[in-house]
Structures are given as C-alpha cells and as structure tokens.
Amino acid sequence: MKGSQRGFGLVELMIAITLGLFLSAAVIQVFLATNASSKVQDSLAQVQENARFAMRFLGKEIRMAGYMGCSSIGNISVNVIADPDDVVDFDLSTALVGEDNVAAGNALGAVVGTDVLHIKKTSDDSIRISGNLLPNNANVQIVDNRLGFVQGDYVMISDCLSADVFRITNSPKTKGAGNTTLTHANGSNSDNKLSKIYGADAEVFGFENVDYFVRDTGRDTVGGRPINALYMRRLVAGSGGVTSAAMELVEGVEAMQLTYGVDTNADRAVDEYRSGTAVTDWEDVLSVRVSLQMVASDENVVGQTGAANAQSIVDVNGNVIANTDGRFRQIFTNVFAIRNKLP
C-alpha cells in the first residue's frame, strides 16, 4: 500500500517566509533599540562617575581654601619671610582666586574659554615643635619629619595667635628619624628671624598652592575627537618649593565654568554670584559654584545637532551646546562654601 506524501505548497511557503521576515525584523528592532539604550546608559554611567570624582576633588580643596590649622584665615595676620613671597602671599584675598575664560597661550595650557581655580592653604596634617625657640635662632625643632619636608619647602608655623611662613634652608632628617631641625636662614628668606618666640604648643604645616584647570589630554576618541580632562598641579611638602607638573585627575571634563558667591554688604553671607571678571575683591568671595560639562568617550550614541533625536544640553550661560560627534553630554553643578571664611 502506497502512502500519500504531502508537502508545503507555494502559498504556504510564502506565508511562512513572510512571517519569518516579520519576526526577524522585530527581533532586530528590539536588539538595535536595546543596544542603543545600553550605549546611552553606559555613557550616562561614565559621565556621572567622572563627575562625582571631579566634584570630590574640587569640593575638598575649595572647602579647605585658606586653612591654617586652629585659626581661621583673617583672624590673624601671617608674617611671610619666605622668598619669593608672592608664592605664599596668604590672606583673605589670595586664599582662593579664579581666572575667567582663559585665552589661548595661557601658562597652564588650559582649554581656551574654560575657567581656572587657584587655591592656597596649609597641609591637613601638622607637626608639633619640640621646644621653645630663641628670639635670634634661625632653627625650628620638630618632633619628627613625618610630612616629608625637604630643603626649599615652604612651611608655616602657627600657635593660633600668630603665624610665620618661611623656606627650609637645610636638609632635615627623613621621616621616622626622630627630632630634626628646620632652618630658615637668609638667602631663601628675606630675614632669618620669625615674628615671635613660639612655644611648644605651636605647630608646623606644609604650605600648599593648588591649581585646577581643564586641559587636552593629547588622546583622541576613535573618531579623532580630542579628549579633555580635569588637571591639577601642586606645590606641597616634599617638593622642594617647586610646583609639580600638571597631573590628570578625571577624564571627560570638557569644560569648567566657575561663579563666585560674593558678600556685598560685609554681613559674612553670600548676596550674589558673579563671574571671575566681575569679582572686584576676592576677600569677599565666600563660596564657589562649580559647573562641569562632562562628555562620554563613545561617539554616535545620541543624535547630533540638527537631527530629530539630537541631545539638547544647555550650558551655564543658557546656550545650547553644539553636538557634532554624537557623544553623550551632561552639565553637573555644585556649590561649595569656603569654610575658613565663614563665621
């Protein structure tokens, strides 16, 4: 007995192919949408993480601007014998100073049109002196060199009533070697005498200058776009009085804009925010509003300017940021008080 054999007809085959194409198109569409969404989420996570790190660095330094141990800057005058003294000129008007929209060829190599922040303060940690000082003695005895002072360093000695800044002219013992001497002789100092005789309650700090700015890293994206980052350079204990080379902190900071909270009526409270060029006296600045324009590294993630799906981001001046590379961008803003200027 012969069994009948039956197969797909042409119509059935065409229907099956059509349904398969519809299903394949749907799957591809879902995949493309998921992939695009994943890229946006990855870019968002990148800019948020980088912004957090950048704000952490900036916030810590801004809050500590003008720090000088147990006394707030402005409560006591600082006697500076260090030479050159402009490096450590330290008062309410110099503890924090900004540059607005720097021009091409600036000394820091900062991106044109971005802002720069200069901060002066002492080190967070300090060292106790090990005995009284004689009035004509050009030496300061400390219990241990745990801050790593070296010859040429700028240091501050303070007892909450007075403060002096000098440069170390000898080579102190290294950390852990016990009592050591910090000499402040003529040559690197305008005088070898401090303003007073400090007692055993005095402390010695490292003097710090810190600059923050945005610079081109020299690296490019896959599409050849420059990658900017937040940079820092410092003059700290152990540097021998030489400011370090610029150090990259956080990638993806495309621009930094700063405005300053100004006390206009001497009531020790912020009355208005001004750009750096509009600040007439930096002594009146009590806080800093930091705006960072962050950008992810992957291109063609969002629509470019003019496209239907273009990402529309507005900068601190209210201008829409042009997007010519499809990279995800976001503006982050935070306000930090200068603690050592507050009541």
Image (tube, rainbow, N blue to C red):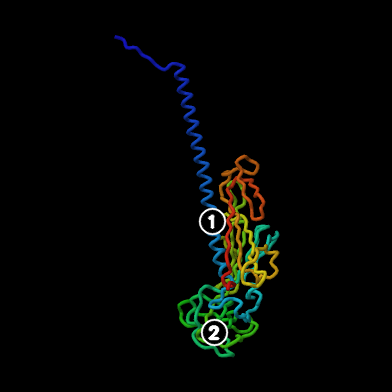
Q: x, y percentage for residue 157? A: 56, 81
Amino acid type indicated by mark 1: Asn
- Residue at disc 1, secondary structure: helix
Which numbered circle lies on residue 86?
none
Q: x, y percentage for residue 107? A: 67, 64
Residue farthest toward the top in the current orientation of the protein: 1
The vertical placement of 250 against 69, above or below, is above
Q: Nearer the viewer, residue 44 or 107?
A: 44
- The residue lying at 49 percent from left, 32 percent from top is 26
Quadrant for the N terminus in the image: top left
Residue carrying label 2: 140
The vertical placement of 268 against 164, above or below, is above
- The residue lying at 59 percent from left, 66 percent from top is 233
The vertical placement of 297 against 249, above or below, is above
Q: Nearer the viewer, residue 56 or 204?
A: 56
Amino acid type indicated by mark 2: Val
Q: x, y percentage for residue 19? A: 47, 25
User: Residue 116 falls in which quadrant of the image?
Assistant: bottom right
User: Residue 293 falls in which quadrant of the image?
Assistant: bottom right
Residue carrying label 1: 50
Q: Residues within 10 Å of mark 1 (few under 14, many from 20)?
A: many
Q: Nearer the viewer, residue 235 or 39?
A: 39
Q: Residues within 10 Å of mark 2 (few under 14, many from 20)?
A: many
Q: In this view of the protein, can residue 166 be seen by the observer?
A: no
